Amino acid sequence: MKVLIIGYGSIGKRHIDNLISLTNCKIIVCTKQKQDNYLKKRNCIVISSITNCIKEKPDIAFITNETKFHVNTAIKLAKFGIPLFIEKPLSNSMNRVNELESIVKENKIVTMVGCNFRFHPCIKRLKKLISSNKIGKIISVHSENGSFLPDWHPYENYSKGYAGRVDLGGGAALTNIHEIDYLYWLFGNVKEVYSIVRKISNLKIDADDFSLMLLQFKNKIIANIHLNFFENPPSRYCKIIGNNGIIFCNLLTNEIKIYSSKKKKWTKELKLKKYDHNDMYIEEIRHFLNCVRTKKMTINSISNSIHSLQIVLNAKKSSKLKKPITMK
């Protein structure tokens, strides 16, 4: 199997290593960088243009370049019927997204947008708990993801990385789309968005480093989502409030506890003593490869991921206009 990797950043390298561990594949890397020791050790072929990469007839492609270029890259590959794994977020705008969706549907191409937290054991357990009506009717949700951007990749200048650059599709709201995605996966479509999205810290970036979103789902659940690039130490959790209790999920310590309003006490639901963060990425690749093999729709196809993208784009619009935005 030939696998094409578009982009050679940290997430591209992660996928290369995971693919090698899972498959006996030949990897082609599309990058303008020269072949280095990392690529040589893994016997990767380096090609500088997408056109020449396509001539190699890859069986699947992973799009891991900067967010701004995702859709245009995907369209070029989709025209050749290549199954696509696109790193989150799908894009930083709706420009050509519908065109890509049409090409994919017309050619029946298997696609997946890589929101790996759908494969986190805690998030999967949350879905089961909600489905089993563990705390009764869900009323509201609070989700938070705060971390210190300079700590993400200490080996590079954070101000030059895509996450902090508007021109490359960065910013806290888009880069941290995981929280929006898993809440959409848990609770369904969003009806209305009200938000503040802006740059408020002294980080040397030009993209938003703070986002506070208030979402009303079509099922009337209200969620507030706090995202930032300046919190140190980091915080990442989800609190779900129902009429019979509370579910608290800490995604840094990998544990879930439940409060029973009837018993008036907390009980431990899940505690992962040893959890490798990379396992989520491995599971999502396994899922994608299986769907390609069986020609089935993935858990997060392009069509599915468009709603999450629209939530973030409407949050930005809401912040700019200073009013709630109704989702179409």
Image (cartoon, grey):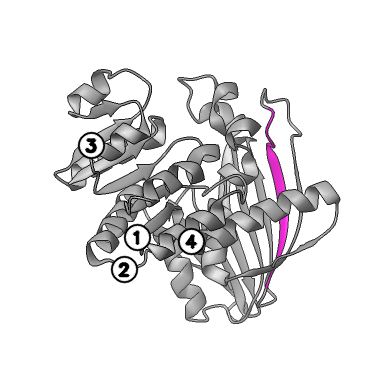
Q: Which residue is mark 2?
A: 296
Q: Position of residue 139 (x, y in %)?
A: 68, 74
Give, as a single range, the part of the protein colored magenta.
206-217
In the image, residue 327 above or below residue 100: below
Q: Residue at x 23, y 43 (%)?
A: 57
Q: Is residue 196 left or right of residue 232?
A: right
Question: What's the CA distance linking mark 2 and mark 3?
Answer: 24 Å
Q: Which residue is mark 3?
A: 27
Q: Position of residue 4 (x, y in %)?
A: 29, 40
- Of marks 1 and 3, which one's residue comes earlier in the chain? 3
Mark 3 belongs to which amino acid?
Ile
| Front-most of residues 177 and 296 | 296
Give the crowd class for mark 2: few <14, some 14-19, many >=20 residues within 10 Å: some
Quarter assignment of residue 264: bottom right
Quarter assignment of residue 214: bottom right
Give the crowd class for mark 4: few <14, some 14-19, many >=20 residues within 10 Å: some
